[in-house]
Amino acid sequence: MPMLRLPKVMGAVALVSLVSACSPDSEPPPKDPPPREPAGFWRPDDQRITLHAFGFFGGTFQWVGRRDVLTGEQLEALSGLKFIEGADDCWQDVMEYSLVVVDAAGQERKAIAREHNSSCWSEQDMIDIETLKPLLATLECATTGLPSTELSMAKTVRADNGCQHAFFSYQDEPSKWLKVVASRPDRPHTFQVSGCYGKTTGLELFDESGTVLLARGSAEGTSSSDCATLTHPLEAGRVYAVKVTSQAVTMGGHVYLEIRGD
């Protein structure tokens, strides 16, 4: 049977096509990468998070969490924080949470979360408020307006929980109560007020009944750091009452109280 012979021109075209197909410079067209879940706000090398809450009706407080003291529940809640595109609306007088994380290199990242995921056209990264709620549920911070003028109604908090409890500071503002339990029993605990410029502040530590005075401190508020402070040992298994006074002289607003085991 005679061999089939291609015309020279057709043979040349076929040869070029074959060489091109085998050329190492020839690559298949790139494929679209698979869709990825958006990265969360909290990352494995983050060392600290600060949360500042502000709301006209909901109140104000601050919380600082260091990785080495965060609970397992809080770490899980932080890992669930997700970014979201803010809604195209602006709800007024809702709670707003400003978050700042610091990584191992000392670099900061910031984001905000607002009730109803209202953006108010903010240019900051936004976190889905629903993913922030599990973290908020772990906090024991007293917000402005929450501390009571009656000891029987006072909120009980733990020392060293990262909270900076907030108190109103207006002219003739009545004193407010908190109940406190030790974080590290049988050692001194420091009660420190901050943000005091233009406000006279006072602290009084009592037994649980509020009748036996154990320690007190006061300050005139000549500067932001001129604040009431006191240090006293707290015993295991006991609850203490602390009375906080903050009255505006030249500057109103609020102050913060941090309680920590030394």
Image (tube, rainbow, N blue to C red):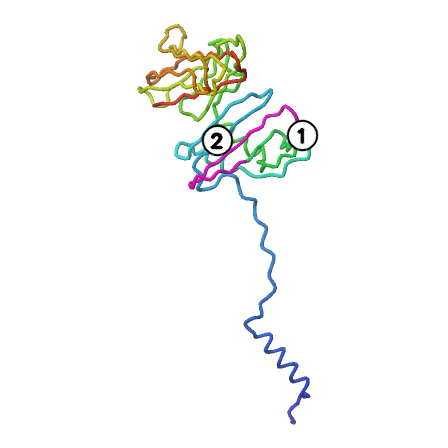
Kindly report the distance in space between the C-alpha atoms of the residues bearing marks 1 and 2: 24 Å
- Viewer-nearest residue: 34 or 121: 121
Secondary-structure class at tag 2: strand
Say which amino acid is labelled 1: Cys
Residue at the spot 46% in from the left edge and 24% down from the top edge: 163
Query: Residue 165 location in percent, x, y?
Result: 48, 20
Residue 60 shown left or right of residue 240 in the figure: right
The residue furthest top is 211
Q: Residue furthest left?
A: 186
Q: Which x, y percent locates residue 56? A: 60, 21
Above or below: residue 88 compared with residue 2: above
Q: At 56% from the left edge and 71% from the top edge, which residue is drawn?
A: 25
Q: Residue at x 46, y 18 (%)?
A: 223
Q: Earlier in the sequence, mark 1 or mark 2?
A: 2
Q: At numbered mark 1, what does the secondary structure look like: helix, strand or loop? A: loop
Residue 22 in the image, given as x and y percentages of width and height: 57, 75
Quadrant in the picture for the N terminus? bottom right
The circle on residue 58 is: none
Residue 92 covered by magenta stretch = yes
Q: Nearer the viewer, residue 1 or 172?
A: 172
- Taking the view exactly as shown, the residue that stands out farthest to the front is 222
What residue sits right under mark 1 in the picture? 90
Report the span colored magenta: 91-110
Q: Which mark is residue 50?
A: 2
Residue type, numbered disc 2 = Thr
* Quarter of the rendering containing residue 181: top left
Magenta region includes residue 22: no
Residue 126: x and y in percent read 59, 36
